[in-house]
Amino acid sequence: MKPTLIGALLGAVLAWAALSHGIGGFLLMALFMAIGALIARVAGGRIDIRAILDALTGRRSSS
């Protein structure tokens, strides 16, 4: 899918959440979508979670 189409679909879903469930539903849906995207990137190998955890704990730096 093209990024423009994905962005339009994401906007439509978030607009639906805001209209039907108020600001709380909007924020909750946005949070779950972000978590789902992060999980998908980790599962797809685009994000190395161990490198992030090592950097956060001070074991390794990016420089």
Image: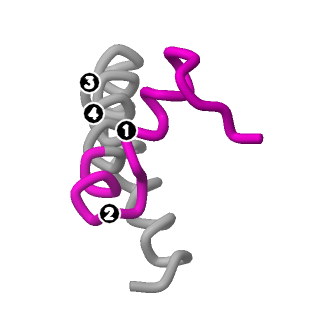
Q: Which residues are magenta?
A: 39-63
Q: Residues within 10 Å of mark 3 (few under 14, many from 20)?
A: some
Nearer-N-terminus badge (2/4): 4
Structural crowding at the residue carrying mark 2, measured as other residues with C-alpha within 10 Å and reported as few (<14), some (14–19) or many (≥20):
few
Residue tagged 1: 50
Is the C-beta separation of discs 1 and 2 under 8 Å? Answer: no
Looking at the rendered structure, which numbered label has been put on residue 20? Answer: none
Residue at the spot of label 4: 32
Q: Which mark is residue 21?
A: 3
Residue reaching furthest front? 59
Which residue is at the front of the view, 38 or 2? Answer: 38
The residue at which mark 2 appears reads as 45
Of discs 3 and 2, which sits in the foreground?
Answer: 2
For badge 1, the amino acid type reads Arg
**Among the two numbered marks 3 and 1 on one chain, the one whose residue lies closer to the N terminus:** 3
Q: Residue at x 58, y 17 (%)?
A: 58
Going by the numbered disc 4, the residue's amino acid type is: Phe
Mark 4–mark 3 contact, CB under 8 Å?
no
Q: Is residue 40 magenta?
A: yes
Mark 1 crowdedness (10 Å alpha carbons): few <14, some 14-19, many ≥20: few
Quadrant placement of the N terminus: bottom left
Kindly report which numbered mark, 1 or 2, lies closer to the viewer in this rendering.
1
Q: Is residue 30 magenta?
A: no
